[in-house]
Image (tube, rainbow, N blue to C red):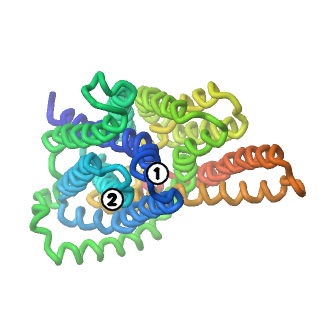
Amino acid sequence: MDDKKKAVWGWAAYDWANSAFATTVMAGFFPIFFKQFWSYGADVNTSTAMLGFGNSAASLIIALMAPIMGAIADKGSIRKKFLIFFAYFGALMTACLFIVQKGEWALAIFIYTAGIIGFSGANIFYDSLLPSVADENKLDYVSSLGFSMGYLGGGLLFSINVLMTLMPERFGLPDAASAVRFSFLTVALWWGGFSILTIMWVPENKDDKGKKGPDASSISIKIIIEGFRQFFETLKKIRRRKTVALFLLAYWFYIDGVDTIIRMAVDYGLSLGFESNDLIVALLITQFVGFPAALVFGRLGEKWGPKKSIYLAIFVYMGITIWGAMMTEKHEFYILAVAVGLVQGGIQALSRSYYARLIPKGQEAEYYGFYNMLGKFAAIIGPTLMGIVGLAARRILMPPSPTAAQIEAVGMLASRWSIASVIILFIIGAVLFYFTDEEKGRAEAL
């Protein structure tokens, strides 16, 4: 394998590595285990509120630090070193979840929040390395390869972890709770272990003069000050680079719709009466469908162009939103999981590679800092919109002096209205994206 292919596979290997955290911890076990084990004996409302605050705090910290950290990394050409630092910090925090005992919900939230900071912080620099490892005509494919490997790697480990909880004795564990705790250790080992391929195969970035940047340990106050200065300069440049600004605005709306569906699907499924096991099965379906689908979208990006392919994904998401508002049976939820798996990785991968075409060389980490900042602020509008629509629907539809049956029926209908409202985000994002001109963006980036 030549050095170029090694760099590509080393880069994609990190998605294989860190997706274990996204799947097993964030989407799978932590929310359920938090309720059933760590919150045992605690006031449920208080612990739930604190979990929400922890998630919000992690997102806010990453959103605020992303552009600054990117600017510092660009100034010192040390993106890979920042990736390694955040990745292993996140893996260490994940391993620490193993030692959290029953009822220690506050400690669980603290460690989990720190893990999210490691996970999200590393992704800033992971994304920014894409233009360094992929030729311009391979950006779409390589970006999709990363997401595809992430779906496969995350799905494989999650499958093993689910089997551990269903049959703990087969794995030499006393019970399901011990299996879940041990699963957090497997995620840490998986994340840290496969990241070694990224360390070995992805070359260190070079600065504009072709010289290696300083070690992370030698970052000076001068570089930090320069990073802040560069951040504000880039903010001004984004305002002048109208194509970048327009794309980021479009991306914010349609990715907000994507993230809202991801985050609200479990809650919505439970509101329709589905069991938690059904939701885990649906998550596994999405993971394994997402593996080949992301690769297919990479090829579509090369054949059709990323813009048309992103539009295809947006239109599919519109259909998913409508379907979700109308479904009533369990098998329909599984069909929905398949549909999400078909486009979720594709829209994320091609958005990342499309953005790479619009930004200037040598400032990738900083510009991807803004990109990831919007990603962290995503799923703000959507849940708020769903809440407003749901409350308004209940107020409009609720009859005077309702019976218990009427309250339940109106609540169900209001939930359907709320999920249907997410289609507005996809429509706004699609309209704004229509006016994004890639050729004009390339010219502005020079």
Give the quadrant of residue 367.
bottom left
| Gap in angstroms between the C-alphas marked 2 and 1 | 50 Å
Residue 108 in picture, x, y percent from top left: 35, 55
User: Nearest the camera: 358 or 403?
Assistant: 403
Image side of residue 384 versus residue 85, left or right: right
Query: Is residue 361 visible to us here?
Result: yes
- Residue at 38 percent across and 37 percent down: it is 147
Q: Is residue 407 above or below residue 272?
A: below
Image side of residue 255 versus residue 359, left or right: right
Tag of residue 107: 2
Query: Is residue 128 visible to us here?
Result: no
Q: Is residue 96 above or below residue 160?
A: below
**Mark 2 is on which residue type?**
Leu
Circle 1 packing at 10 Å, graded few (<14), some (14-19), many (20+), is few
Mark 2 vs mark 1, foreground winner is 2
Give the quadrant of residue 396.
bottom right
Residue 36 in picture, x, y percent from top left: 45, 45
Assign the N terminus to one quadrant of the image. Answer: top left
- Residue at 18 percent across and 64 percent down: it is 76
Assign the C terminus to one quadrant of the image. Answer: bottom left
User: Nearest the camera: 79 or 283?
Assistant: 283
- Residue at 80 percent across and 47 percent down: it is 404
Secondary element at tag 2: helix
Counting residues from the N terminus, which is met first, the one under dot 2 or under dot 1? 2
Give the quadrant of residue 359.
bottom left
Residue that mark 1 sits on: 439
- Residue at 46 percent across and 43 percent down: it is 32
**Mark 1 is on which residue type?**
Glu
> Badges 2 and 1: C-beta atoms under 8 Å apart?
no
